[in-house]
Image (tube, helix red, strand yellow):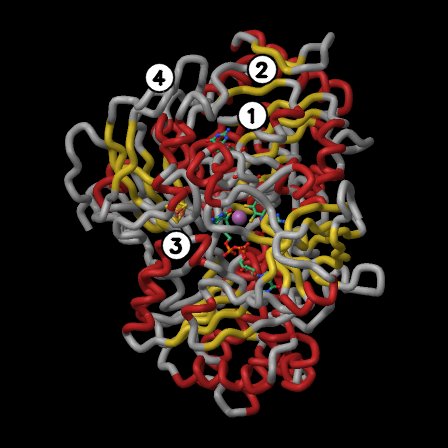
Amino acid sequence: MPAAPSSPSSTDTHCPYCSLQCGMRLRPVEPAAPGEPAVAVEERPDFPVNQGALCGKGSSAAAVLSARARLGTPLVRDHRTGRLREASWPQALERATQGLAAAASRYGRDAVGVFGGGGLTNEKAYLLGKFARVVLRTANIDYNGRFCMSSAAAAQRRAFGLDRGLPFPLADVSRTGCLVLVGANPADTMPPAVRHLRELREAGGRLVVVDPRRTRTADLADLHLRPLPGTDLALALGLLHLVITEGRVDEEFVATRTTGYERARAAAMAHWPERVERLTGVPVAHMRRAVELFCDAPTGMVLTARGGEQHSKGVDTVGAWINLCLATGRAGRPRSGYGCLTGQGNGQGGREHGQKADQLPGYRAIDDPAARAHVAGVWGVAPDTLPGPGRSAYEILDGLGTDGGVRALLLMGSNPAVSAPHAGHIRERLRALDHLVVCDVVLSETAELADVVLPSAQWAEEDGTMTNLEGRVILRRAALSPPDGVRTDLAILRALAGRLGVGHGFPHTAQEAFDELRQASAGGQADYSGITYERVAAENGVFWPCPATAAGRPAHPGTPRLFLDRFATPDGRARFADVSHRPAAEEPDADYPLRLTTGRVLAQYQSGAQTRRTPALQRAAPGPFVELHPRLAARLGVADGDPLTVTSRRGRATAPAHVTPTIRPDTVFMPFHWPGAGSANNLTNPALDPVSRMPEFKVCAVRVEKTPPGGTA
Ligand SMILES: Nc1nc2c(c(=O)[nH]1)N[C@H]1C(S)=C(S)[C@@H](COP(=O)(O)OP(=O)(O)OC[C@H]3O[C@@H](n4cnc5c(=O)[nH]c(N)nc54)[C@H](O)[C@@H]3O)O[C@H]1N2
Ligand SMILES: Nc1nc2c(c(=O)[nH]1)N[C@H]1C(S)=C(S)[C@@H](COP(=O)(O)OP(=O)(O)OC[C@H]3O[C@@H](n4cnc5c(=O)[nH]c(N)nc54)[C@H](O)[C@@H]3O)O[C@H]1N2
Ligand code: SF4
Ligand SMILES: [Mo]
């Protein structure tokens, strides 16, 4: 679809926040006051994912560009006072590189770590990975995407041989027969996507929502299943059991396009409906109804998000939902399939191009000799100088400042002091570092702990590509120049590399970085070599894989839909997962009798670093709360608004009660967007999935008490 014409002075670009990467237009305006942004956000109806619609975060995104909200100069920690003070760029860069180099020479190269973010552009993620492997030569680089869709990625890889959030454009969702949303609340987390759900319903399609809470998304559904947090694996097995016993297996699809069915079938047979009802709390009648809706429809999709994935069994849980799709032939066919709603703006591209501990650009495995040789060739280094796989995000954070752990950390695009599980412990670990360098646009809670803070330019001030939840590579264009005193992340990496003795290979422009990334990705699974800035702009995004073609040949069109002919496994068949129910890492007991689950609210984004600085959003969602059912509230003698203390084995959080019948009586919910006393991550359990290393954000055991006047319970 051609891009709609924009007025000569306005810039077509995309939202700085979530993985929809909604199209928007930035129009130059006279700043309302000195230091206020010189652009206004406007609709851009030609972008097919959001068709002009924006949520409140997108429409208020210009606020974070204002001088009031953000960092305007580098900061270094003063040895005498212990406080951060303003510094010049040369001073700050010198201090930053000295600290990194000192740790490497004292403890070895792997004692220097890099922690990235899924909000960074492809170009930044690529150069951050290159910086770690070529300049620091450390194995220990990982990113916050590990906390996001790593379980779905691992499960998709296991089943399909490839992982791309959605294997089809988001708009296909409105044309399927029955959509099952597992642990996803797009009405709050991706509001413009709701139009596709509405279109689905208008076209006669069915919607099933699986969530322990009756969310605004569940309100749109034909059927709402409310499992106990942490029991989706059992639920999916129970549904497969019914599919089998009711004779609804697509035998022909199973025989011709899959492997491993027999074991999956045996596991499902051990999860009979009554057993699953006991484990999940979902009545057998509701399970039967779900199977009826899913199998009676001619086509079907299952999409998972963090509710089903952020578990110490997240990979197996997603595997069980994929099994359901495979057994019913709802995969690798038009209007059918499994997909993951990725979360951050570039959660997808961020891992494809080298921020993940075990991956090189192009979605290549870092322990594959051919992959190493290819990427080393592009980087002009010997393959054996490239480090091997490093530790995962939580494991890096957990080991900070310890023997054998990371002693100096470069952090770009994440705020783990608020967003990591067991965050009280992680804040201690961050403080125990010899040296912490944070590149951010604001003084985040993590930047407050740093030795050096480098102020970065942001989305509207620089070019760069992002890969949205559909695997569509889109282009953000600079609409403004960065304020004085602020540098782009690309310029920061180039300066750090230069001071650490690598004076080349860190380009000046994002487009040069992208052209190198294309070469590095060529021949890999996530092949971007045929994608150019010009094409992305002209075609409203290009879906990977998109290999370059020989001169004179037509360009590759990109791949909006995957797996229609074959899956990306060596034999072309999808693999059933051999999975069985297991309990959460921490189940309730007499001391901690309730389940806590955590998630998001509409008006705040992640650790809140940006949205808490946006006045309209902060007014809409000013602070944390504890959602609990009226029956539980009555049992605890709690009224709406009463101050509550929530305690887990790891810590305590205090926040007002929000009494609502939309939650299960055995479960409480807290959003995680705020630091301080009400921070949900004071409580969460860092138990990791054995394959994806995803922490169990979505379930731990807690006690809830009314906070007595003047103190904690
Ligand atoms: N407003 C807003 N939007 C965002 C973000 C944000 O911070 N704020 N972040 C972005 C990012 S990075 C991400 S990853 C996405 C996340 O998007 P979502 O996954 O939609 O968001 P969550 O609120 O984390 O979780 C979704 C639902 O999972 C449910 N849930 C909790 N435990 C369980 C369980 O055990 N099983 C099941 N089935 N469901 C459970 C919760 O009740 C919640 O309604 O949102 C993106 N969009
Ligand atoms: N309890 C609980 N905890 C969770 C979750 C949950 O569901 N429950 N969800 C997890 C998930 S899915 C995620 S994705 C994580 C996210 O949690 P975080 O990784 O903390 O994500 P953000 O808050 O978006 O942090 C991004 C930081 O980068 C900065 N930034 C933005 N743009 C740029 C840029 O271009 N350059 C630089 N240098 N900095 C930039 C922002 O100001 C901000 O400080 O939280 C996880 N934590
Ligand atoms: S849904 Fe996501 S991408 Fe779209 S405007 Fe809101 S935050 Fe931005
Ligand atoms: Mo996320």
Indicate the amino acid at tag 4.
Pro
Indicate the amino acid at tag 1.
Leu
Q: Is 222 located above or below residue 671 in the figure?
A: below
Q: Which residue is mark 3?
A: 191
Q: Is 562 located above or below residue 75 in the figure?
A: below
Q: Are marks 1 and 2 in contact (CB under 8 Å)?
A: yes
Q: Are marks 2 and 4 in contact (CB under 8 Å)?
A: no
| Label 3 packing within 10 angstroms: few (<14), some (14-19), many (20+) | some
Q: Is residue 696 left or right of residue 650?
A: left
Mark 3 vs mark 4, CA separation in Å: 33 Å
Viewer-proximal residue, 179 or 674? 674
Residue at image position (57%, 11%) is 86
- Pointer 1 or 2: first along the chain: 2
Local SS, label 2: strand
Q: Which residue is mark 1?
A: 443
Q: Is 556 located above or below residue 324 in the figure?
A: above
Q: Which residue is mark 4?
A: 34
- Pointer 3 or 4: first along the chain: 4
Q: Which residue is mark 2?
A: 75
Picture coordinates of residue 553, whole percent (x, y): 21, 47
Mark 2 vs mark 4, CA separation in Å: 23 Å
